[in-house]
Amino acid sequence: MTRGWIRRTANGVAGVWIGLGLAGVAGLTSFVAMAGPREISAADNRALDRAVAGLAPAQTAIEVNTSFFSGGPPSWMTPGQQEAFGLAVWSLFKPPIFAPLAASRAFELGPQALQSSYGSIVLAADSGLQADSRLVDGSWPGPARAGVPGGTAADRAGLTEPVALPQQVAQQLGAELGSVMTLVTAARQKVDLVVSGIIAPDPNALFWATGTAAIGSKGQPQPVVVGSAGLTGMAEILSGRGVEVSWYWPVSVSRLTAGGVGPLSSAVSDVADESLIPAERSTGLDFYSFPTLSSQLPGVLGGIEAQLATVESLDDLVIGGLFAAGLLLMVLCAALVADRYGPEFALVR
């Protein structure tokens, strides 16, 4: 492309069209400069929505774990003590952390398998059992009651505890609604675990997704579940054994924006550095394993943030290239106009 060709082309085109072309290029360049960053931000937020939508429940939760030695009531953690501890930890969460208290969960698990008349089982409790499972048959397990069928003193000193069985567990144990799973506690107490309900676990619920009540293959210890109403009876059954307790607070990420990823990650990390001594004291119990707070969320958000930063760098390069191309076109059009109307610009008559 020579200067002479450009001059001939300019002379063959009406000057008004060159001017309109210059205005169009200028407008397009301005549009790219203004709308590009907004579109990049919107695209980042859409990508973030897709990323967080695919996260597992445990990846977006703040978790506290501890253990204590159960000697039976009142050393067992009652529902009131569960609530007190949960409130004490929840009070540590500050904006931008939004973790609804109603969505929190407390899980308890006897670490040792119990031998019952139906095989090896593990007793577990879920404070939100009815929200984390669907009742297939029967009724939700209620509180334990004193005594087991029979007329002996040992029978009268026994305990009947209603429990729920996941469908798969019921099949593997060969149990059904109304089945009685008999076992003997460490204190030689007779216990009847009566299957009051058959449930279908929600695979997305923390109680099942975190493996707290992992359903094993045939021949392995299987989870037998109670709700908050069965805690007192569970304490009596596990008297003299260590108990593992976990709390989970799901953090809301449904309205998270790309600009809020870093602050939320930092806020959750800061909570992990907080002392849990006041929360422990709120229960009135002494844990032999000091409560530890952790969360996968900062690491997950860090990975998402790094991916967004990489995409933003590429987007910025594209926008910068388009802007530079627009400027070059503006300069070219200006050169054509100047060449076409050179005499007029020089006031040559």
Image: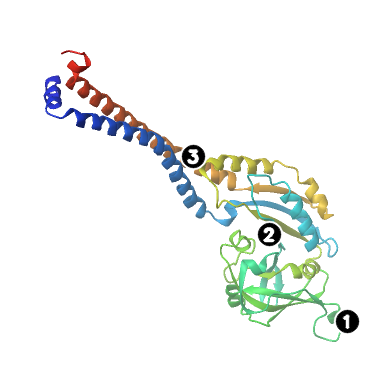
The CA distance from mark 2 to mark 1 is 43 Å
Closer to the chain start, of discs 2 and 1, is 2
Image location of residue 213, percent across then percent down:
64, 64
Of labels 2 and 3, the one closer to you: 2
The mark nearer the N terminus, 2 or 3, is 2
Q: Is residue 97 above or below residue 144?
A: above
Residue visible at 45% across and 45% down in the picture: 42
Position of 274 with respect to 2 (left or right) is right
Q: Is residue 16 visible?
A: yes
Q: From the viewer's perspective, is 319 left or right of 219?
A: left
Are the two marked residues, 3 and 1, in contact with CB atoms closer than 8 angstroms? no
Q: For marks 2 and 1, give the one nearer the viewer.
A: 2
User: At x 46% / y 49%, what residue is drawn?
Assistant: 46
Disc 3, SS = helix
Q: In which quadrant of the rendered view does residue 180 lie?
A: bottom right
Residue 343 location, quadrant: top left
User: Residue 115 location, x and y as percent?
Assistant: 71, 72
Q: Which residue is mark 1?
A: 153
For numbered disc 2, what is the local secondary structure? Answer: helix
Considering depth in this image, is 310 or 107 the residue closer to the camera?
Answer: 310
Q: Amino acid at mark 3?
A: Ala
Residue 171: give x, y in percent of width and height: 58, 77
Q: Residue furthest right?
A: 153
Q: Is residue 193 left or right of residue 16?
A: right
The circle drawn on residue 306 is 3
Label 3: few (<14), some or many (≥20) within 10 Å? Answer: few
Give the residue number, with chain letter if any, for mark 2. 102
Mark 3, mark 1: which one is toward the viewer? Answer: 3
Residue type highlighted by circle 2: Ala
